[in-house]
Image: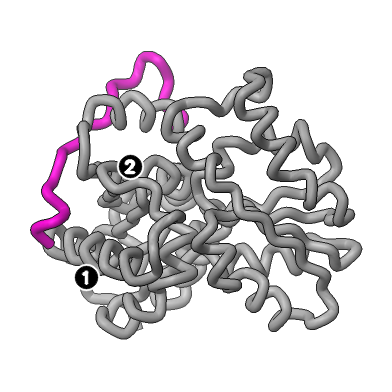
């Protein structure tokens, strides 16, 4: 049965900039949909926080989205939250909530040729074991190598994403050495910040297929909306609203780059909110 309020927006949230990689993919796949994005830039990164703190932050993030818009679905564009709080968010809210883990794991299972899969993510996500457990549930014969990459999020947030820059390149070489040694032919970028480092990662692992969690989550969202007849019936383009918990100006400049906007396009309008009030 079709949703009676299909024009409702889609909510997306992340700890900072990384979720914009998912927004870009959603906008490409579903150009008619209205989007509302929250980046918790005042508390980034989430990946080094305790599980209790991550769950508290996630509850505040989704409360903000739902208080500002009657969202028909929410994409948790954060690997750390997907690994540590997705169950809680689904229990406490009666709308579809899509994380990044299951879509990425299914894509990796399809992509691998030798059954040897690497995972890179934040320390909290790796500690949760969520990706590894999901992969082994797909196929217990998979060989999985996991690596925490604590410095990748700060690199992305500060614009160090160029493959020719020695700072991200040397950092990637150090972190990715166990993945290279493992012989993995497929690598899950287990944080939506990490696709912004794809050029750097591919330079270190040139023959490895990269699984972009934001892209796979967008594909999962499109499938869900289609199956439940929840797509907006209006013609594109849809609107996008952006909110952050810290200084908006720097986010707006970064967002234009990560969303693929041309130099002639205006910077997105970004509003600051007091997320601690939610």
Q: Position of residue 199 (x, y in %)?
A: 67, 32
Task: State which quadrant residue 205 falls in.
Answer: top right
Give me the residue at 64% from left, 37% from top. Answer: 198
Give me the residue at 36% from left, 14% from top. Answer: 264
Position of the N terminus, as image quadrant, is: bottom left
Give left or right: position of 246 versus 97. left
The residue carrying pointer 1 sits among few (fewer than 14), some (14 to 19) or many (20 or more) residues within 10 Å by Cα, namely some
The colouring scheme, among rainbow, by chain, secondary structure or one colour, is: one colour
The residue carrying pointer 2 sits among few (fewer than 14), some (14 to 19) or many (20 or more) residues within 10 Å by Cα, namely few
Q: How many marks?
A: 2
Outermost residue, left direction? Answer: 277
Q: Nearer the viewer, residue 1 or 197?
A: 197
Answer whether labels 2 and 1 touch (C-beta < 8 Å). no
Q: Is residue 264 above or below residue 256?
A: above
Give me the residue at 86% from left, 56% from top. Answer: 182
Q: Position of residue 152 (x, y in %)?
A: 55, 40
**Could you say whether the residue bearing mark 2 is in a helix, strand or loop?**
loop
Q: Nearer the viewer, residue 228 or 173?
A: 173
Q: Measure the C-alpha gap from mark 2 to mark 1.
A: 18 Å
What stretch of residues is rendered in magenta? 259-278
Residue 53 seen: yes
Q: Which residue is mark 1?
A: 5
Q: Which mark is residue 61?
A: none
Outermost residue, top direction? Answer: 264
Q: Is residue 58 above or below residue 13?
A: below
Q: Which residue is mark 2?
A: 237
Residue 190 lies in magenta, yes or no?
no
Task: State which quadrant residue 55 falls in.
Answer: bottom left
Which is more N-terminal, label 1 or label 2?
A: 1
Position of the C terminus, as image quadrant, is: bottom left
Q: Magenta: predominant secondary structure element?
A: loop
């Amino acid at each position: 049965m079709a949703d009676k309020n299909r024009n409702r927006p889609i909510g997306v949230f992340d700890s900072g900039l990384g979720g914009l990689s998912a927004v870009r993919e959603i906008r490409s796949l579903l150009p008619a949909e209205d989007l509302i994005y929250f980046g918790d830039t005042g508390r980034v990164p989430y990946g080094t926080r305790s599980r209790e703190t991550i769950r508290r932050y996630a509850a505040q993030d989704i409360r903000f989205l739902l208080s500002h818009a009657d969202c028909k679905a929410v994409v948790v564009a954060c690997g750390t939250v997907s690994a540590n709080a997705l169950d809680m968010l689904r229990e406490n809210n009666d709308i579809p909530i899509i994380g990044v883990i299951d879509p990425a794991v299914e894509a990796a299972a399809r992509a691998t040729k030798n059954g040897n899969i690497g995972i890179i993510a934040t320390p909290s996500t790796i500690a949760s074991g969520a990706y590894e457990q999901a992969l082994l549930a797909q196929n217990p014969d998979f060989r999985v190598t996991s690596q925490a990459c604590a410095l990748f999020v700060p690199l992305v947030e500060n614009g160090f994403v160029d493959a020719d820059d020695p700072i991200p390149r040397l950092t990637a070489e150090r972190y990715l050495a166990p993945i290279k040694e493992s012989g993995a032919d497929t690598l899950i970028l287990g944080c939506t910040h990490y696709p912004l480092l794809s050029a750097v990662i591919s330079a270190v692992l040139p023959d490895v297929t990269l699984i972009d969690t934001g892209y796979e989550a967008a594909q999962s969202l499109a499938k869900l909306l289609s199956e439940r007849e929840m797509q907006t019936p209006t013609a594109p383009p849809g609107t996008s609203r952006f909110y952050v918990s810290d200084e908006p100006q720097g986010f707006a400049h970064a967002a234009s780059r990560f969303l693929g906007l041309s130099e002639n396009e205006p910077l997105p309008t970004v509003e600051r909110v007091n997320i601690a009030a939610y």
